[in-house]
Amino acid sequence: MIVAAALAGWGAPAAWRGSATGMVSAQGSTRPVFSSLPSVLGSVFVIVMENQNWSSIKGSAYAHYINGTLLAMGAHAEQYFNPPSMHPSEPNYIWLEAGSNLGITTDNDPSANHQSTTNHLVTLLQNAGISWKAYAEGISGASCPLTSTGNYAPRHVPFLYFDDVTAVNNPSSPYCIQHVRPYSELTGDLRSNAVPRYVFITPDLCDDMHNACAPLNNPVQQGDTWLSQQLPQIFQSAAYQHGGVVFITWDEGQGSDGPIGLIALSPYARFGYASTLHYTHSSLLRTIEETLGVTPLLGDAANASDLGDLFSAAPTSARVTRFTVGRRGSTVRFRWNLAHGALVAGFAVYAGGHRLNRGVIPIHTATRYHYRARWSGGGTYRLAMILVSGRQITVAGR
């Protein structure tokens, strides 16, 4: 991995003593609105959460990771809705796959609601030679998971409702078993750079904000915690760093059609940007089709705007500003800002050629940093930051 190699290059630290903190401070972008998507977007990851209006997420003390990290490092939509009067969950998942609910109005299993049409996203991808997989929590991978078990619900895996995927509800369908896999396999696929171009991720009913589950017993907090634990492995992957994009959305509004959340995370996302344009699931489907280059535009995707407003034509350029060093006795205090947020994999601070810290911090997008260390010698002070893209930024001062 690019980042691992870069961090390893810093070598083992000398004896050190210190602490570091990061604070996120995001500002809305002033860059112009782009009318189309960057042509370089690569792998597409879609994560669908459950049953929360955006008003229950934005600013919530129970969604610390979403508000404190994800909104700062990516772009989001303030006016994103499920299709008009489209409830309950299952029709919205079908819509994300076909641009229509195909007449489905219930949450029944595929045995009752399966569809014979081949005009849906993953079949377009398959016919175009573009790889795809769904990764779902709570399934074994030994069969095509057509029925509910534990906290797994097939209604949250839309591909299972199409006969050409399941060989008409056949639990032994090789094609289904090959493409609908246990979520636990995603980690290995990311590490070996074996993830497909289109990745659909289905958390279970405890992790997707649907149910209240022990020990937190708070659906929003459960989902936020799950995202904080699972997204870093995607951000560190080559599939993401090389022009990938993660879309996080919710299936449907509660008591209305929304707004619900839509967050876009990518090296090409507009840092800290909040779009006020009107979008629906049709917009996300159109964006996926355009990014992966498949046609025809499915159902209502042909009538929708894509999510191009959330992206820049080029990756955000990060740089260190206001690097200062203060000293009191044997304590040295480093301060610096990172302009234009970026995913930070680690940093190292040096004094007189000696490294004073381990150089690894949790991945986040803080824009202001502080670090204290013990150093009784003199010499030039230097900072090296490594981004998850593999880029290293170095500055020096006294």
Image (cartoon, helix red, strand yellow):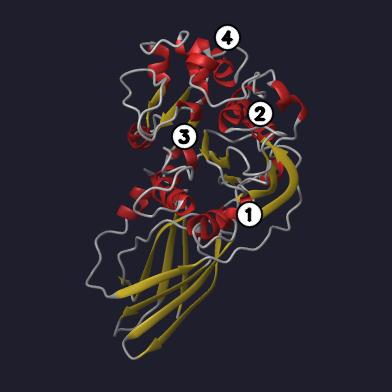
Task: Find numbered disc 3 in the image and state the secondary structure of the residue it sits on.
Answer: strand
Q: Do the residues labelled 3 and 2 touch (CB within 8 Å)?
A: no
Tell me the quarter of the image containing the N terminus.
top left
Task: Find numbered disc 4 in the image and state the secondary structure of the residue it sits on.
Answer: loop
Residue at the image position 62 percent from the left and 50 percent from the top: 54
> Gap in Å between the C-alphas at discs 3 and 1?
23 Å
From the image, state whether disc 3 or disc 1 is nearer to you: 1
Res 34 quadrant in image? top right
Residue at the image position 39 percent from the left and 11 percent from the top: 173
The answer to whether residue 223 is above or below residue 169 is: below
Disc 2 crowd rating (10 Å Cα; few below 14, some 14-19, many 20+) is some
Percent of width and height locating residue 58: 60, 56
Disc 1 crowd rating (10 Å Cα; few below 14, some 14-19, many 20+) is few
Q: Which amino acid does label 4 sit on?
A: Ser
From the image, state whether disc 2 or disc 1 is nearer to you: 1
Question: Can see residue 164?
Answer: yes
Task: Find numbered disc 1 in the image and state the secondary structure of the residue it sits on.
Answer: helix
Res 73 quadrant in image? bottom right
Q: Which amino acid does label 2 sit on?
A: Glu
The image's mark for residue 116 is: 4
Percent of width and height locating residue 162: 53, 15
The image's mark for residue 290 is: 2
* Tag 1 residue: 55
Question: Can see residue 312?
Answer: no
Taking depth in this image into account, of 24 and 369 the one nearest to the observer is 24
Q: What residue type is labelled 3?
A: Ile
Tell me the quarter of the image containing the C terminus.
bottom left
**Which badge, 3 or 4, comes first in the chain's sequence?**
4
